[in-house]
Amino acid sequence: MKKFLSLWVMVAFLATQSFASIGESTEASTGTVENDPASVIAKYIQAVGGAENVAKIKNSIMVMEASLQGATLVMKTVADSENHRMMQETSFMGNVASKTIFKDGKAKAMAMGQEQAIPDEMAEMLKIQTYAFPETQYEAMGYTLELQGTEKIKKEDAHKLIITAPNGMKTVEYYSVESGLKLRTSSEATGDITYANYQEKDGVKIPMKLTIKSPMLPMELETVVKEVSFNSTLKDSDFN
């Protein structure tokens, strides 16, 4: 169970990336080709509602639920880009099992009644998660993007995008060639997260269903987004 809870916390970092992707479309102004990484991302941002709607979102609250062998897991993420702070909390059977907090440039993790400071290098990786749409900060924060052709994701052609963090950690994301929407995120840490059931919320489309497949789990885990809110009035206590 401890392994599962650790996985669930890591999944939270990727789950926050499921809303949208980076920046404004550059196809018209720069003439980039469709299979260029920036153009793939630009098409995604247009598919989910456009750069203008994405830019309006300064903070977000997301609550997801999943069931594992009859037990309910709840994961809550609060991301506040204006003040560069973030909180992720995982509850198991109604009790808080783990929590990660990033604020004032520092991060800490709490689990099983114990608290531990997160090293600065790892804390820096959490900074991008203060954004509801972290992809908007890739270039500014030193991330690189590489397109590696296309693959089939559930019989749908998808662009394969390699995202490399400044510390060398790689994440693979797949975007539908036809619709532009994000279909899947893969990494060694969390396995595969597949996105489905996109619905509109405050002018942007978000996937309301995430399916997680990992060797750390006994079975595929289906999570459902139960609550999403943008630009809420946040309190300091939300990050304690």
Image (cartoon, rainbow, N blue to C red):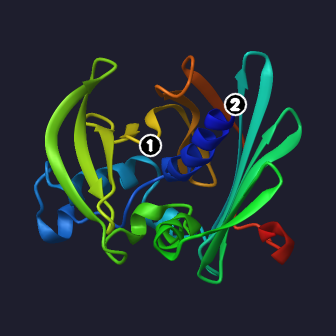
Quarter-of-image position of residue 197: top right
Residue lying at 63% horizontally and 54% vertically, measured from the top left = 202
Evaluate if marks 1 and 2 touch, with contact meaning CB atoms under 8 Å apart. no
Check disc 1: other Cα within 10 Å, few if <14, some if 14-19, many if 20+.
some
Residue lying at 83% horizontally and 53% vertically, measured from the top left = 113
Give, as a three-letter code, the residue at label 2.
Met
Residue lying at 73% horizontally and 56% vertically, measured from the top left = 99
Of badges 1 and 2, the one in the foreground is 2
Q: Position of residue 193 (x, y in %)?
A: 47, 34
> In the rendered view, does 97 fall on the left or right side of 50?
right
Of 74 and 10, nearer the camera is 10
- The residue singled out by tag 1 in the image is 189
Q: Is residue 48 visible?
A: yes
Quarter-of-image position of residue 132: bottom right
Give, as a three-letter code, the residue at label 1.
Ala
Q: Position of residue 103 (x, y in %)?
A: 66, 77
Residue lying at 60% horizontally and 24% vertically, measured from the top left = 222
Mark 1 element type? loop
> In the rendered view, does 159 fall on the left or right side of 222?
left
Check disc 2: other Cα within 10 Å, few if <14, some if 14-19, many if 20+.
few
- The residue singled out by tag 2 in the image is 1
Q: Is residue 3 placed above or below 98 in the rendered structure?
A: above
Of 214 and 112, nearer the camera is 112
Of 138 and 88, nearer the camera is 88
Q: CA distance from mark 1 to mark 2?
A: 17 Å
Q: Is residue 135 placed above or below 235 in the rendered structure?
A: above
Mark 2 element type? loop
